[in-house]
Image (cartoon, coloured by chain):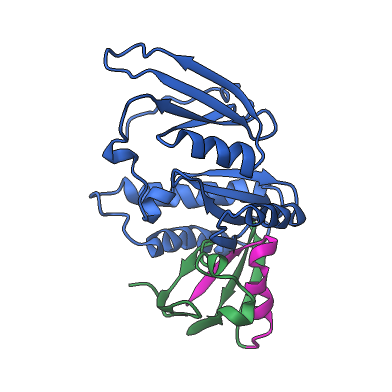
């Protein structure tokens, strides 16, 4: 199941706020200082929707990841399935 | 893995006294730091070369950069810059840089305005996770940064840093020199550890 872990600090909270607005996604936590965002099949994020500047965007997964990154460019991030 | 020696307590340092680098542009360097940036010239040594037999005579001079810190230079008389001291347009060269602190975004913007008013080319202004910075070069090509920290580092940051670096070092130590080649490896390793935390029954974390 694709999951991302988001450190519970101000600069990364747009990920959590966005996830809460997507009905099929689940947001758990925080535990041990992290939120977990997950979905059975697929998570996708748009940089501009999150309001992330490039430096923060490219470190958006620094909290940790379960799954496979199938797209991660300057504007879009997609995580699917489980890591091989 | 063999046991490693570890400090029983931090060594008793109290911030930056000076960082130092060589220059072959004496007047330009003094003009930039003292006159354009406004950092007071607070100390200068002029000496015959000593130590190694081929050590050049030198000037070693310091500019006050606040809170007891200084930025210092060596000027080696009668020498030419070696290849390793040539500035390069390469992110790996820019990794070695000096970043000074200001206390607010207003001060950061004031720094930018003041630098630009005296002709300094501020190349970038970048918002990072916890800091926002402006970037520029001195006449030697050395990368400089002024930054303000949006919030203090707290326990949650320390613990996260520990998790990230532990995951990365474990991969580095696991095999060949190219074992740590993609940041996804670190994210997955860290995610695996955190997944285990979330799999614990509530109250056990």
Say above or below: A76 vs A6: below
Expressed as whole percent of the image width and height from the top left, the position of residue B7 reads 50, 24
| Identity of the residue furthest to the bottom in this view | A23
Say above or below: A4 vs B194: below
Expressed as whole percent of the image width and height from the top left, the position of residue B26 reads 47, 33
Say above or below: B168 vs B128: above
> Where's the C terminus of chain A, which quadrant?
bottom left
As rendered, which of B109 and B41 lies closer to the eye?
B41
At horizontal 52% and vertical 73% (from top left) the residue drawn is A3
Classify residue B41 as left or right of residue B98.
right
As rendered, which of A7 and B68 lies closer to the eye?
B68
Expressed as whole percent of the image width and height from the top left, the position of residue B115 reads 64, 52
Q: Which chain is blue?
A: B
At horizontal 55% and vertical 55% (from top left) the residue drawn is B135
Can I make out residue A32 in this image? no
Q: Which chain is green?
A: A
Classify residue B136 as left or right of residue B2.
right
Can I make out residue B190 in this image? yes
Q: Is B63 part of what is drawn in magenta?
A: no
Residues in magenta, as a range = A1-23
Say above or below: A5 vs A49: above
Expressed as whole percent of the image width and height from the top left, the position of residue B127 reads 61, 62
At horizontal 30% and vertical 39% (from top left) the residue drawn is B84
| Identity of the residue furthest to the left in this view | B176
């Amino acid at each position: 199941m694709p999951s991302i872990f988001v450190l519970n600090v101000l600069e990364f909270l747009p990920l959590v706020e966005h996830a809460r607005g997507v009905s099929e996604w689940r947001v758990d936590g925080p535990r041990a200082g992290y939120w977990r965002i997950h979905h059975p099949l697929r998570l996708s994020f748009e940089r501009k929707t999150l309001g992330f500047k490039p430096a923060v965007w490219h470190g958006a997964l620094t909290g940790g990841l379960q799954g496979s990154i199938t797209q991660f460019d300057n504007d879009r991030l997609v995580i699917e399935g489980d890591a091989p | 893995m063999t046991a490693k020696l570890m400090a029983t307590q931090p060594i008793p340092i109290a911030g930056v006294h000076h960082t130092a680098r060589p220059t072959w542009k004496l007047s330009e360097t003094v003009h930039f730091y003292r006159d354009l940036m406004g950092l007071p010239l607070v100390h200068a040594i002029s000496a015959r070369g000593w130590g190694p037999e081929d050590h050049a005579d030198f000037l070693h001079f310091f500019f006050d950069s606040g809170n007891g810190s200084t930025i210092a230079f060596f000027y080696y008389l009668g020498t030419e810059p070696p290849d390793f001291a040539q500035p390069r347009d390469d992110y790996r060269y820019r990794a070695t840089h000096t970043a000074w602190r200001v206390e607010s975004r207003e001060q950061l913007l004031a720094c930018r305005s003041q630098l630009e008013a005296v002709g300094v080319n501020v190349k970038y202004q970048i918002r990072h996770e916890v800091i926002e910075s402006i970037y520029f070069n001195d006449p030697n090509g050395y990368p400089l940064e002024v930054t303000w920290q949006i919030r203090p580092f707290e326990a949650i940051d320390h613990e996260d840093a520990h998790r990230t670096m532990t995951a990365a070092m474990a991969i580095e130590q696991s095999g060949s020199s190219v074992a740590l080649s993609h940041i996804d490896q670190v994210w997955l390793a860290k995610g695996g550890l955190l997944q285990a935390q979330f799999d614990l029954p509530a109250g056990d974390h």
